[in-house]
């Protein structure tokens, strides 16, 4: 998606939309001029990049929504009662989103529209402060993830190799899906892991393809499935050619199909699995396999706990092979434990068979001894019987 084209096109439509009152259109135009300058200065860039245009695009949607909540009334004319009604309706869930659900992104509307520059330009900051005096800062504390086993089931139901590859990259590298969809063959470097001796790929994640909050970095793949699929997909591509010839809408479609068939649900609340959940699932998976929070944060492109070592982290990548050895060791330990259990079961079985064999041999020996005793008794009885016969015969008794 080209955010620059989308922003310029939709901004032009918004500020020239006759169904939006002129006062608000003028305010929106003034804000966009201010925000464009702010983004360039705060990011230290001479011209807007795609990440900036993506940010600006979100304001267009927010402005349209807020304008409809106030029934297209000029923001400069809003009263405390107007603001209070919209605020209460949002908090009470009376204002719905396009899906007929309560707005879940109120934090961004409050922080970026009501309490920020747009309403400040309209001269309503003091009214917002009065109305929202009881409003608390919202933080997203929801936890949702799926286990590796579920991820495997979902990916296995994807048909094309490039679809499966996107799934493995999302779970393996843990980067935002829109960033992954922009990657090119030149962003991947095949190499041999110095510890496991297995082949892997180093994935370069350049700044121009990342979200503004993510750090530029490179990550090595952890799963052999990712390596195998990259070998297949990259084989027929030119160096600067994109891996994926489809966009987010198509990726969402084939993911939803696989999720629907597997009936995969997120833990702990059972929500349907989305692309975003692949990232959180990777984080949980690595933490369970012994990675530290700093190592996971670094893989996600977040700043580690120590700001001072940021430059070393991005240059040395926190020794990416060291954390990977934990994945390898985890798998090796699992196999080793299974082998030990198998050996233990085999040993118990052998010991049991040996005891049974010993018992059988003892029984056989006792039987043979008893049989010898019986045969001896038979011979003695036979000899005694013959003696009796001879004695009786000698006495003329038949």
Image: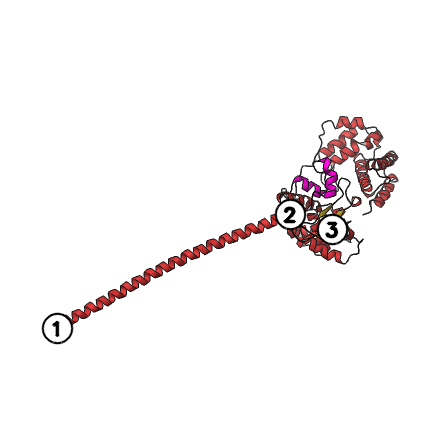
Residue 303 lies in the magenta stretch: yes
Where is residue 51 shown, x and y percent of the image?
80, 42
Q: Which of marks 2 and 3 is nearer the N terminus?
A: 3
- Residue at 86 percent across and 36 percent down: it is 37
Q: Which residue lies furthest to the front in this view?
A: 194
Residue 333 lies in the magenta stretch: no
179 and 216: which one is in front?
Answer: 216
Name the chief secondary structure element in magenta: helix
User: In whole angstroms, how far apart are the C-alphas of marks 1 and 3?
Assistant: 115 Å
Crowding at dot 3, Cα within 10 Å, few <14 / some 14-19 / many 20+, comes out as: some
Residue 29, placed above or below residue 362: above
User: In whole angstroms, how far apart are the C-alphas of marks 2 and 3?
Assistant: 31 Å
Is residue 158 shown left or right of residue 5?
left
Where is residue 3 shown, x and y percent of the image?
82, 44
Question: In the rendered image, which residue does mark 2 sit on?
Answer: 325
Q: Is mark 1 on a helix, strand or loop?
A: helix
In front of the other: label 1 or label 3? 1
Question: In the rendered image, which residue does mark 3 sit on?
Answer: 251
Query: How are the colours assigned in the image?
Result: secondary structure
Q: What stretch is highlighted in magenta?
A: 291-319
Q: Earlier in the sequence, mark 1 or mark 2?
A: 2
Where is residue 220 shown, x and y percent of the image?
70, 48
């Amino acid at each position: 998606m080209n955010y620059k084209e989308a922003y310029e096109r939709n901004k032009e439509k918004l500020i020239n939309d006759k169904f939006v009152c002129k006062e608000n259109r003028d305010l929106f135009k003034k804000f966009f001029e201010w925000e464009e300058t702010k983004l360039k200065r705060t990011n230290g860039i001479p011209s807007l990049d795609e990440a900036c245009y993506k940010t600006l695009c979100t304001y267009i949607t927010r402005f349209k929504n807020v304008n409809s909540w106030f029934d297209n009334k000029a923001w400069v004319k809003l009263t405390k009662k107007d603001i209070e009604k919209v605020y209460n309706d949002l908090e009470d869930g009376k204002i719905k989103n396009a899906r007929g659900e309560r707005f879940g992104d109120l934090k961004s509307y409050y922080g970026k529209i009501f309490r920020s520059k747009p309403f400040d330009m309209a001269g309503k900051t003091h009214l917002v402060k009065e109305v929202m005096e009881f409003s608390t800062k919202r933080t997203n504390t929801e936890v949702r993830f799926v286990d590796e086993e579920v991820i495997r089931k979902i990916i296995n139901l994807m048909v094309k190799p490039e679809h499966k590859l996107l799934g493995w990259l999302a779970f393996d590298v843990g980067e935002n899906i829109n960033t992954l969809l922009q990657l090119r063959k030149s962003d991947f470097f095949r190499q041999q892991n110095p510890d496991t001796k297995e082949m892997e790929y180093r994935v370069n994640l350049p700044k121009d393809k990342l979200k503004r909050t993510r750090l530029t970095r490179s990550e090595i793949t952890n799963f052999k499935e990712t390596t195998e699929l990259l070998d297949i997909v990259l084989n027929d591509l030119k160096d600067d050619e994109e891996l994926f010839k489809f966009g987010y809408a198509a990726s969402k479609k084939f993911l939803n199909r696989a999720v629907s068939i597997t009936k995969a649900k997120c833990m702990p609340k059972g929500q349907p699995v989305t692309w975003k959940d692949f990232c959180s699932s990777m984080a949980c998976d690595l933490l369970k396999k012994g990675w530290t929070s700093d190592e996971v944060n670094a893989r996600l492109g977040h700043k580690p706990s120590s700001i001072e070592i940021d430059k070393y982290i991005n240059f040395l990548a926190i020794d990416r092979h060291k954390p990977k050895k934990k994945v390898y060791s985890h798998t090796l330990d699992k196999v080793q434990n299974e082998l030990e259990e198998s050996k233990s079961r085999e040993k118990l079985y052998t010991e049991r068979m040996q005891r049974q064999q010993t018992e059988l041999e003892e029984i056989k020996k006792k039987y043979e001894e008893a049989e010898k005793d019986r045969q001896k008794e038979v011979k003695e009885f036979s000899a005694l019987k013959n003696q009796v016969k001879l004695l009786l015969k000698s006495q003329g008794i038949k």
